[in-house]
Image (spheres, grey):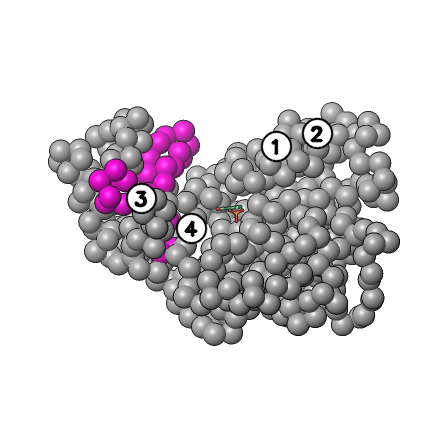
Amino acid sequence: MPNSTHTAHPRFLPYVQPSPNALSPYADHVAAVLNQNCNLWHLSPAANVVEQSLLRWFADLFGLPRSTGGIVTSGGSMANLVALTAARDHALGRSAQAEGLQTGGTPLVLYTSEEVHSSIDKAVSILGLGTNNLRRVPTDERFRLRLDALAAAVAADRAAGRRPFCVVASAGTVTTGAIDPITELAMFCREEALWLHVDGAYGALAALSERFREPMSVIGLADSVSLDPHKFLFCAFEAGCVLVRDRQHLVNAFSAQPSYLTMSEDPDFIDFANHGPQLSRAFKALKVWWSLKHFGADAFASTIERMHDLALHMGSEIARRAAFELLAPVVFNCVCFRVRALDDAGNRRVLKSLVDGGDAFLGPAVVKGRSGLRACFMNLRTERSDVNFILDRLLEFTGD
Ligand SMILES: Cc1ncc(COP(=O)(O)O)c(C=O)c1O
């Protein structure tokens, strides 16, 4: 304990990292005792049904069709990697598994916004696509991917003989929580025959709340979606998930049938080893399914709203106090701001002073090139008084 990061502290507010709900660490313990291997259904029949019903529940949340397949992953990064593998192999067609990218064909190009999470860079690199073929399209004044700039970039690549194949939209960008224009992007991708992946690791599950249902429900227009139960379902690490509109794309990318594994096919079960890169897999779905069953979706909806309210409260306190400046509008559960009297280096320094003094742990934010602080409300213990405490303390550091 002494040298562990105290993530349960009410003023632990960096990154996108919640305190876990009380049930999920216990569920992980039960899963470890059961010791199911969730790769082949006959090694984990009950777990298989739990994972399938969880995936169906998520697919229904976004109106995805019956053809949808998916898998519970370690987190959003792995979910993005799985989805982009399916997208790449779909673009390469029948030669994908046998030839890979070794045939020297036309370079594949992927488009996303300049606000995208680094897991997309990693996936592009791991998949051999090359980050030089990742286009970071500029965003508008609300940090959303600009469709006109996307259309121009796709046209320029086609004219230069390259092959656009995929657009990654964000449902909750990692710094400011912006939601890209998903409906318009889905229409554009359909016209241009591009795969649309939505990285909803941060925000997709906010669809549970009435406040965010409208912008999030259109996520179901995509070809694939990532979401992270270890964020807005407050599950203990690790629990991510990916859904792919046509399950066959997952199977094409990941299936392998070695002679040393006995597979007994049954239409009621899925061999999840054929939906992702892992063979041995823990029963991560249990804590997610059990959390939803135990607390109910409404409990998560109201918690997400409470987190949003805390961000709105901080936003209005910052707007009221002349010493601070908001770096981005508050649209979600995070607040990016800056101490006016300090330069970029000074703003980075106060972040460290807050941690060193044991007062609060906030994250760094760089918004349109300017450095500041970021508070992300995902902690079940945080109150408004904690927000006021942090702002008062920051004023003391700056001598105001
Ligand atoms: C938008 C977005 N995508 C992907 C990820 C990566 O998720 P994970 O940390 O679960 O791998 C994050 C993490 O914060 C995120 O905010």
Q: Is mark 4 within 8 Å of ligand 1?
A: yes
- Badge 2: few (under 14), some or many (20 or more) residues near its Cα, within 10 Å? some
- Nearer to us in this view, 355 or 304: 355
> Regarding mark 1 in the picture, which secondary structure is present there?
strand
Q: Looking at the image, is mark 1 or mark 4 nearer the viewer?
A: 4
Q: Position of residue 276 (x, y in %)?
A: 70, 51
* Residue type highlighted by circle 2: Asp
Specify which label sits upstream in the sequence, 1 or 3: 1
Question: What is the distance, in whole Å, between disc 1 and disc 4 at their CAs?
Answer: 28 Å
- Say which amino acid is labelled 4: Gln
* Residue matched to label 2: 157
State yes or no: discs 1 and 3 in contact (Cβ < 8 Å).
no
Tell me how far mark 3 sits from mark 4, CA to CA. 12 Å
The residue that label 3 is drawn on is: 361
> Image check: 291 left or right of 110?
left
N-terminal label among 3 and 4: 4
Instruction: Looking at the image, tell me whether mark 1 or mark 4 is earlier in sequence order.
Output: 4
